[in-house]
Amino acid sequence: MKIDTTRFGAIEIDDNSILHTPSGLFGFDDQTKFCLIQHRPDTNFRWLQSVEKPSLAFVVIDPADYFTNYEIEIPDVHIEALGIDKSEDVIVLAIVTVGKRSDEITANLVAPVIVNSRTLLGMQIIIQDERYGVKHRLIENVISQDGERSTVEKCQVRSSAVRAD
Amino acid sequence: MLVLARKVGQSIVIGDNVELMVIEVRGDQVRLGISAPKTIPVHRKELLEQIRQENLMAAGDVDVDAVGERFNVLPREKKAG
């Protein structure tokens, strides 16, 4: 189907790729359909674009790309609600907030969007873990990763390896 | 709003299976014990509000090109430094 977006214009998306979030996202209770748009081929950033509201799109990342120690336990009640059978089926997306300055890029690690990749059913959940909050700085994290190599570079290496396969 | 007075060790029951017990009172802080089925989410209200606010901010007016530039610059800046 064709959808209108404020940022990307009118785009064609595969109906079978639409993510359904029956309970919406926090603050956006009525937003139940999204699609994922790759930001650029060479980045790890994607957009979670609302199918029904052209102006609504979130920048999202796979938190594992930037926060290598990030681990969460998804409560059983959500596992059941999303019909998740295997952990391989779980897609975790962290919503990114982009501030006015370049060092104000933060990821929300306490309330990730969890998606069952098999059914494309998703929901934003709250992780009961005091280590995680709504603002974790990406730049700080990139710098703190083992010395010279940034997490971003590592991810690019990894994805090109996947492509070579 | 229903207002009830409770002492330490006393509790209130909400519905069939939610129990809220006062465990400790120290100054202006109260520790509560909550027993509820796993299907009932229990969260601090300010966290919910924080998440809502953060979502609203994340959904703010983010320019695609500006984001692209910043995201691409991110690792390179690091390398130069």
Image (cartoon, coloured by chain):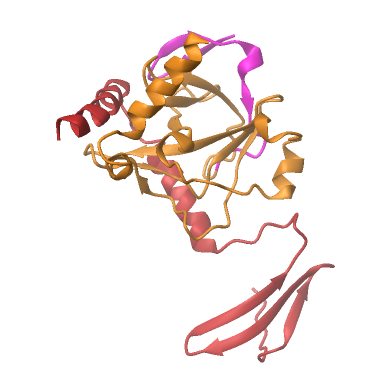
Chain colours: A orange, B red
Q: Position of residue A66 (x, y in %)?
A: 40, 37
Q: Residue at x 60, y 10 (%)?
A: A14
Q: Position of residue A3 (x, y in %)?
A: 52, 13
In the displayed structure, does residue B76 sit left or right of residue A53? left
Q: Position of residue A84 (x, y in %)?
A: 73, 35
Screen quadrant of the N terminus of chain A = top right
In the displayed structure, does residue B42 sit left or right of residue B53? right
- Residue A18 visible from this viewpoint: yes
Q: Residue at x 48, y 37 (%)?
A: A64
Which residue is the extreme one toward the right? B16
Q: Is residue A1 above or below residue A136?
A: above
Which residue is the extreme one toward the left? B81
- Residue A44 visible from this viewpoint: no
Towards the viewer: A9 or A128:
A128
Query: Is residue A43 in the magenta section?
Result: no
Q: Residue at x 46, y 22 (%)?
A: A54
Q: Position of residue A48 (x, y in %)?
A: 49, 27
Numbered label tally = 0
Query: Is residue A5 in the magenta section?
Result: yes
The image quarter in which residue B2 lies: bottom right
Towards the viewer: B64 or A1:
B64
Q: Residue at x 59, y 40 (%)?
A: A29
Q: Is residue A38 above or below residue A103?
A: above
Q: Magenta stretch?
A: A1-25
